[in-house]
Image (cartoon, helix red, strand yellow):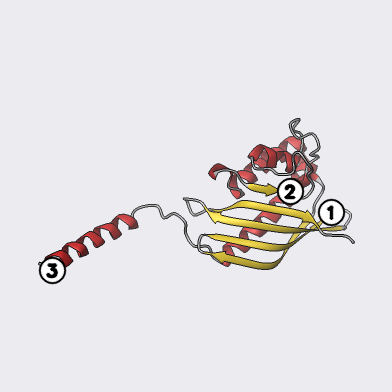
Amino acid sequence: MKAIHYIGLCAFTLAANQALASSVVVNQGIAEQEVLSAQQGWCSALVNISSTHEKEGQAAAKVLAGQVLDAAYGYQMGAVLFKPTLTVNPQTFRTTRDGALAYFVGGDSAYPQDSGFALKGWTQCKIDNAAVFIAGDSATTMGKVHFTGKDGKVTSVDKTWVFVKDDAGQLRIVAHHSSLEYQP
């Protein structure tokens, strides 16, 4: 009788494994290179939004910024914990896509203090991670991001990102904290 139970268990396990093989895998592991690529993609997108603004205007930059938000951030998964560099109360935190879009490109009357961080004429963006911490299906990075303006001046910010994979295996930013360096 034990042999029959064991054979039944094996058949159940085989059937379960076959079902899993044909289903979508959720919470896939993250590789460090994926994180580094996502960060570089963020930098490239920011410079591209800035360039688009100069060549084609704010409306074109806004369309591109919306596409970047949809591709890079996890707003479709829920609230994103986004604390941009240059925000003040009562709109310090941007947990919605609209709030993030206003921060990057301005032009939203609901966020009157936003002039568009991505529209500041950035020509380069460089990531300098202090560390990358990966735990299964999430990754956290902390370090500096250096932005170069048209005049060659470099602005550095302290930045922390948290990435997770969505159901399709796409890396998404779900937390983004940025602040200016402390100046004693």
CA separation in Å, label 3 and label 2: 62 Å
Query: Quadrant of the rendered structure where residue 15 is?
Result: bottom left
Closest to the observer, 88 or 152: 88
Amino acid at circle 3: Lys
- Percent across and percent down for residue 84 are 73, 48
Indicate the quadrant containing the C terminus: top left, top right, bottom left or bottom right: bottom right
Task: Name the residue carrying label 1.
Answer: 149
Q: Within 10 angstroms of label 2, few (less than 14), some, or many (20 or more) residues? A: many
Residue at image mark 3: 2
Local SS, label 1: loop
- Of mark 1 and mark 2, the one earlier in the sequence is 2
Query: Callout 1, which amino acid?
Result: Gly
Q: How far apart are marks 1 and 2 (CA)?
A: 18 Å
Query: For the residue carrying disc 1, how many other residues have a C-alpha within 10 Å: few (<14), some (14-19), or many (20+)?
Result: some
Check contact, mark 1 vs mark 3: CB within 8 A: no
Give 72 or 14, whichever is nearer the viewer: 14
Say above or below: 169 vs 32: above
Identify the mark nearer the N-term, 3 or 2: 3
Neighbours of disc 3 within 10 Å: few (<14), some (14-19), many (20+): few
Q: In which quarter of the image is residue 66?
A: top right
Query: Is residue 44 in view?
Result: no
